[in-house]
Image (cartoon, rainbow, N blue to C red):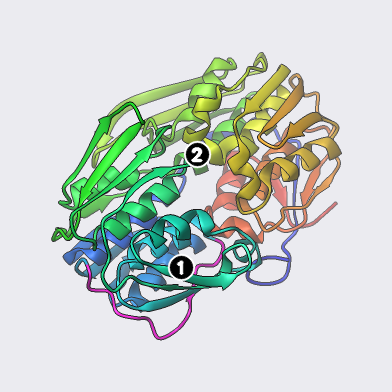
Amino acid sequence: MSAHGDPVPLQSRRSGALSGTAQVPGDKSISHRALILGAMAVGETKITGLLEGGDVLDTGRAMAALGAEVVRHGAGAWSVHGVGVGGFREPEQVIDCGNSGTGVRLLMGAVATHDMAVTFTGDASLNGRPMGRVTEPLSLFGTRAVGRAGARLPLTLVGAASPVPVRYATPVPSAQVKSAVLLAGLNAPGQTVVIEREATRDHSERMLAGFGAEITTRATDEGREITLTGRPELRPQTIAVPRDPSSAAFPVCAALIVEGSDVLVPNIGLNPTRAGLFETLREMGADLAYENPRDEGGEPVADLRARYSPGMKGIRVPPERAASMIDEYPILSVVAAFAEGVTDMPGVAELRVKESDRIDAMAAALRACGVTVEDGPDWWRVTGTGAGGVKGGATVAARLDHRIAMSALILGLATREPVTVDDAGPIATSFPIFEPLMTALGADLTKEIR
């Protein structure tokens, strides 16, 4: 069932050409960070373009519970009156992070070096996800975590009364882990250092610098070394959130596989640590163009135009690219199903511990629709049938995972038979306007299962 109520089945059917402009929501990663750092600054941070999905709204409520004043002024327009670094108060109630792995892990980092106890919980999906990858490095500051087996939620974090600075090398590429350690380092004395062998999305570093933190990055023999000087006074900012490339992936990929389509997706953030999907699609032969490239608020931005691309070929996606597109592999697998030949996706073990086991979930969905999929612990392989070659006709289990639900619905727009998702409710966590946006482009989506 849906995270917040009864299941909401949704069906997609083979559509005519998609056309028009897709105004996708604000970037989820940047929205989370804007609220958290705004709460840790002194004064009023103003935010426009904030993603108003369930995940981000849960983070906003958490900031209010920790003492910040969080106010909505209109669609996407918010302000946060911060309490300063070290100024959080112990919340009176459990912090419910809903479905958001990003939200809970960043929040754990933000409170880890405060002398207080905070209990976190979430929905069934989030409570099943391991948190040890965050609680272990946070323990180096002096933080203690008490939770269920496997460091799963509900979990209480007892903050360090006398935190110490940390030097930590991330064992796997993870922007969430890196960001949690950096946020914890804000309220620790001295310099906190994070080393990552593979670069991950750098929104935290960019935004920390924008708020006035002393943060440097350099290449070393160990990898990318990020050094943060603790206990700064963060300055409030005015933040315009760019549109989310992970959300843009859905109308973009739909246009590539639905015959005759031509879709423009404006104002998309193209941070190089996030744009791996678009690079991969172009290597496959997708008709995907960047228009009006520019810089907004320290982030590269452009308008994306995607056109139907019947001649795409399967490729081997470089494993070192995984960190820059980890959330986009489910929708990439849909495009791969309509390409010619094999698309190999190695180095993606992280997909096994997302909102669902995304390899297993999408492999099951594609197989049920007649696509050949092979998979292993950290890889999977889709053998495409070429344009128009996927049968469809299946009901897909979303597994409380918004990206599985949306990917399956995009699949059904180009299959010969309809595709039904058993519960589209989780889509609201990241892309609350997905259904009306896609319908406005010409997608055949209906709650009346036929």
Nearer-the-camera pick, 374 or 9? 374
Between disc 1 and disc 2, whose residue precedes?
1
Residue 354 lies, in percent from the top left, at 60, 50
Who's the residue at 53% across and 52% down the image? 431
Nearer-the-camera pick, 312 or 345? 345
Q: Secondary structure at mark 1?
A: helix
Residue 202 lies, in percent from the top left, at 34, 40
The answer to if 88 sits in the magenta stretch is: yes
Amino acid under disc 1: Asp
Quadrant of res 254: top right
Question: Which residue, given by chain and number where applicable, does mark 1 sit on?
Answer: 58
- Are discs 1 and 2 less than 8 Å apart at CB? no
Question: Which residue, given by chain and number where applicable, does mark 2 sit on?
Answer: 248
Nearer-the-camera pick, 159 or 397? 159
Amino acid under disc 2: Ala
The residue mark sitting in front, 1 or 2, is 1
Quadrant of res 128: bottom right
Residue 245 lies, in percent from the top left, at 46, 39
Which residue in the rendered view is the most extreme toward the bottom?
A: 92
* Residue 358 position (above or below residue 367): below
Who's the residue at 25% across and 62% down the image? 38
Who's the residue at 53% across and 32% down the image? 322
Q: Relative to 412, is 163 on the left or the right?
A: left
Q: Which residues are magenta?
A: 86-99
Quadrant of res 126: bottom right
Q: Secondary structure at mark 2?
A: helix
Q: Is residue 7 visible?
A: yes
| CA neighbours of label 1 inside 10 A, class few (<14), some (14 to 19), many (20+) | many
The answer to if 70 sits in the magenta stretch is: no
Q: Is residue 49 visible?
A: no
